[in-house]
Image (tube, coloured by chain):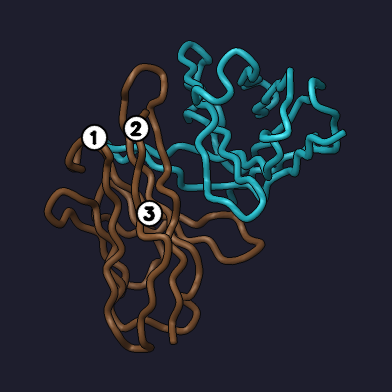
């Protein structure tokens, strides 16, 4: 069973920089897994932030960026703001058998 | 404006059935892969199923395979999820979402607000 791993929680100071990661239990993450990142505030539907590893969705501030760091996909927030405090999910294409897409467990980001 | 509006959720007993619908508007529905994604209360997102533009390719998560059926009616701009043999662990907010292809990769660019399914006796 393919598992996508994310840090359960992370904390960053206002104005600081934080990098959230997204890994695979069985392999290194590459651009071929088409990493995308989603932001979810309480009571709201997820909102796409980053797709195809490093492309920002329309309207997403440039303080959000995506990349591959080592063997994981990464979401970096530069100059964190209070309203960045919410949950972040990555989504990977795994393509094994019929289970082709898997979300990470999500990271709860605290800004304090 | 792209809109996805889910309906059909509710309270159902274990072993029961339910059919979810998603009404799409603001885009050419027949031109996109579509998906159902769910989220159990207080938990993370779980991909459930995908369906190709013409319905010719369908994929399911192992957790729902054999019990859930995704379908679509392009003439009515609608996506469906037929759920049978429901289990307590199927209790979730079910989102309808659209797949966007940028020429090299897919991602979920628009989401509905979700419809809540509660499986309980």
In the rendered image, the vertical position of residue B62 relative to residue A93, given as above or below: above
Q: How many numbered badges does the structure rendering display? A: 3
Q: Nearer the viewer, residue A45 or B26?
A: A45
- Which residue lies under the disc numbered 3? A37
The residue mark sitting in front, 3 or 1, is: 1
Q: Are marks 3 and 1 in contact (CB under 8 Å)?
A: no
Residue A55's tag is none
Q: Residues within 10 Å of mark 2 (few under 14, many from 20)?
A: some
- Chain that is cyan in the image: B
- Which residue lies under the disc numbered 1? A26
Residue at x-position 73% and y-position 18%: B84
- Which residue lies under the disc numbered 2? A2
Q: Are marks 1 and 2 in contact (CB under 8 Å)?
A: yes
Residue at x-position 68% and y-position 25%: B80
Q: From the image, state the color of chain A.
A: brown
Query: On the same chain: label 2 and label 3?
Result: yes
- Name the image quarter holding the C terminus of chain B: top right
Name which of mark 2 and mark 3 comes first in the sequence. 2
Q: Where does the image place residue B78, in percent across and percent down from the top left?
A: 67, 28
Image quadrant in which you'd find residue A66: bottom left
Image quadrant in which you'd find residue A13: bottom left
Q: What is the C-alpha distance between the residues marked 3 and 1?
A: 20 Å
Residue at x-position 73% and y-position 43%: B115
Secondary structure of residue under mark 2: loop
In the rendered structure, the answer to whether residue B10 lies left or right of residue A91 reads right
Q: What is the C-alpha distance between the residues marked 2 and 3?
A: 18 Å
Query: On the same chain: label 3 and label 1?
Result: yes
Q: Chain of mark 1?
A: A
Q: Residues within 10 Å of mark 3 (few under 14, many from 20)?
A: many
Q: Where does the image place residue A75, in percent across and percent down from the top left?
A: 29, 62
């Amino acid at each position: 069973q393919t598992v996508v791993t994310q840090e359960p929680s992370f904390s960053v100071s206002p104005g600081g920089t934080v990098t959230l990661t997204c890994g695979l239990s069985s392999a290194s993450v590459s651009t071929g897994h088409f990493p995308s990142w989603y932001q979810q505030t309480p009571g709201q539907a997820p909102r796409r932030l980053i797709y195809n590893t490093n492309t920002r969705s329309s309207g997403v501030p440039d303080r959000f960026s995506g990349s591959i760091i080592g063997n994981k996909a990464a979401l970096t927030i530069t100059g964190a703001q209070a309203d960045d405090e919410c949950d972040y999910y990555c989504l990977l294409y795994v393509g094994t058998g019929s289970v082709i897409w898997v979300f990470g467990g999500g990271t709860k980001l605290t800004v304090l | 404006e792209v809109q996805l509006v889910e309906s059909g959720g509710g309270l159902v007993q274990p072993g029961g059935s339910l059919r979810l619908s998603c009404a799409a508007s603001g885009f050419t529905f027949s031109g996109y892969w579509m998906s159902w994604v769910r989220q159990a209360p207080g938990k993370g997102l779980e991909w459930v199923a995908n369906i190709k533009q013409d319905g010719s390719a369908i994929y399911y998560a192992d957790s729902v395979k054999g019990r859930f059926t995704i379908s679509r009616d392009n003439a009515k701009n609608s996506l469906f999820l037929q759920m049978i043999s429901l289990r307590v662990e199927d209790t979730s907010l079910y989102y309808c979402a659209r797949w966007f292809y940028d020429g090299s990769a897919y991602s979920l660019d628009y989401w509905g607000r979700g419809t809540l399914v509660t499986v309980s006796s």
